[in-house]
Image (cartoon, rainbow, N blue to C red):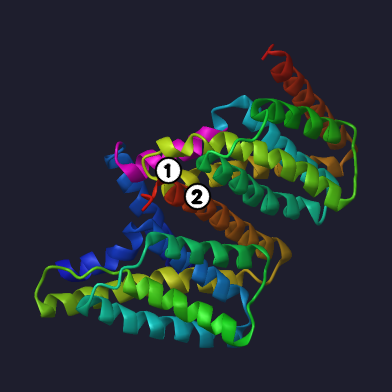
Amino acid sequence: MFRLCRNLPLILIILHFSQSAMAHTDIAMGGGLMNGFLHPVSGWDHVVAMLAVGLWGAFLGRPAIWLLPITFPLVMAFGGALGVAGIPVPSVELGIALSAVVLGLQVALASRPPLWLAALIVGVFAIFHGHAHGTELPQAANPMAYSIGFVVSTGLLHVAGIVFGLLARWPAGKLAVQTGGGLIALTGVGFLTGLV
Amino acid sequence: MDAFYHGLMRPFLDLADLLLLVAAGLYLGQQSRGHLLKRSMWLFGALFVFLFLAYAADLTGPAWVSYLMTLLLGLLIAGNVALPGIPGTLLIIACGGMLGGSFETPDASQAVSVVGILGSLAGIAVLLYYPMLLAEWMQKREWQRIAVRILGSWMAASTLLTLAFIVQTSPTP
């Protein structure tokens, strides 16, 4: 009972938003939030790269496991702002495909660069991903709701990668994580060559 | 009762206000208990004054100011940085003023307006104190502190994107 009372405000907020979203799916709030939430998960190039960020973060351990998921959304939003402003970033699609190859390989090869270098690699690719999303933001019905959905969805993909990456604590799990990284890198090669 | 309910739901329905309130709550919750109580009182005081002023005059400022404040708070939460002394207090007072001033004057009688204000205050109190106490409670374990910081980074990222959109779509003079 105490737990219910403690969580009551949160429950009320969630119920409030779910009611709006279900009853009026075409209104700005529901449309913007859901569009933003679904956008990162609707393209495999984004999904595999986000999973790779989480996997690599978990593989590197502390503090990368939490530093990468904190910095990635911020740098990605900066890239998104460039996209919204119409400031061109060269070879965005190539950068996104390369992100899957490079990040996947880091995991597959169990690479452990210094933290600053790992953050730099992830940050550079975050700009490409953000820019691609940002160019589509002006079409959103409600930019704030779209942005929230988009950032939360991206963050949850990182969390999914981290959870899978935590298996690396065990020898068999480490092999599974490295194999996952290899598959991500191969998928990236597929994007680069146009096979996927 | 309708006026009270309308006032109560007002901060829940405006995403800019809702995010600013939650960000202010999380930011305050990250700080030490002494700062937390003192600064939350400053925030609520400024909010209270500006809420009543907003019912007498139109104090609605440009939307980007609210987003900019949320961005700043989000960055401070993500970096686990508490602004010291006067700058920290001024930031919190500015948040309270911004939140209070953003409330529109309803087309209703004075009595109904006061009930609406009370409703708004109740809604704001829930949205401010719940994240604040939650963030304060979540300072015990490392993963909980990290979760609060990740929430801050998500807020900052969302508002940065929205700010870019607002700047891009605002009419040029």
Reading the image, the residue beneath label 2 is: B164
Q: Judging from the image, what secondary structure is the residue with disc 2 in?
A: helix
The three-letter amino acid code for the residue at tag 2 is: Ala
The verdict on residue B13 being magenta is no
The three-letter amino acid code for the residue at tag 1 is: Leu
Quick check: B57 above or below B169?
Answer: below
Quick check: A24 above or below A10?
Answer: above
Quarter placement of the C terminus of chain A: top right
Q: Position of residue A115 (x, y in %)?
A: 85, 52
Residue plotted at (78% across, 25% down):
A185
Q: Judging from the image, what secondary structure is the residue with disc 1 in?
A: helix
Q: Position of residue B156 (x, y in %)?
A: 56, 57
Foreground residue, A126 or B6?
Answer: A126
Residue A61 appearing in the image: yes
Which quarter of the picture shows residue A22?
A: top left
**Horizontal side of residue A180 vs A175, given as left or right:** left
Quick check: B102 above or below B154?
Answer: below
Residue B36 appearing in the image: no
Quarter placement of the N terminus of chain A: bottom left
Residue plotted at (76% across, 19% down):
A189
Q: Chain of mark 1?
A: A
Reading the image, the residue beneath label 1 is: A33
Foreground residue, B142 or A153?
Answer: A153
Q: Chain of mark 2?
A: B
2 and 1 marks in contact (CB < 8 Å): no
Q: Position of residue A157 (x, y in %)?
A: 63, 40
Mark 1 surroundings: few (<14), some (14-19) or many (≥20) residues within 10 A: many
**Horizontal side of residue A160 vs A176, given as left or right:** left
Query: Which SS type dominates the magenta stretch?
Result: helix
Residue span colored magenta: A26-40
Nearer to us: label 2 or label 1: 2
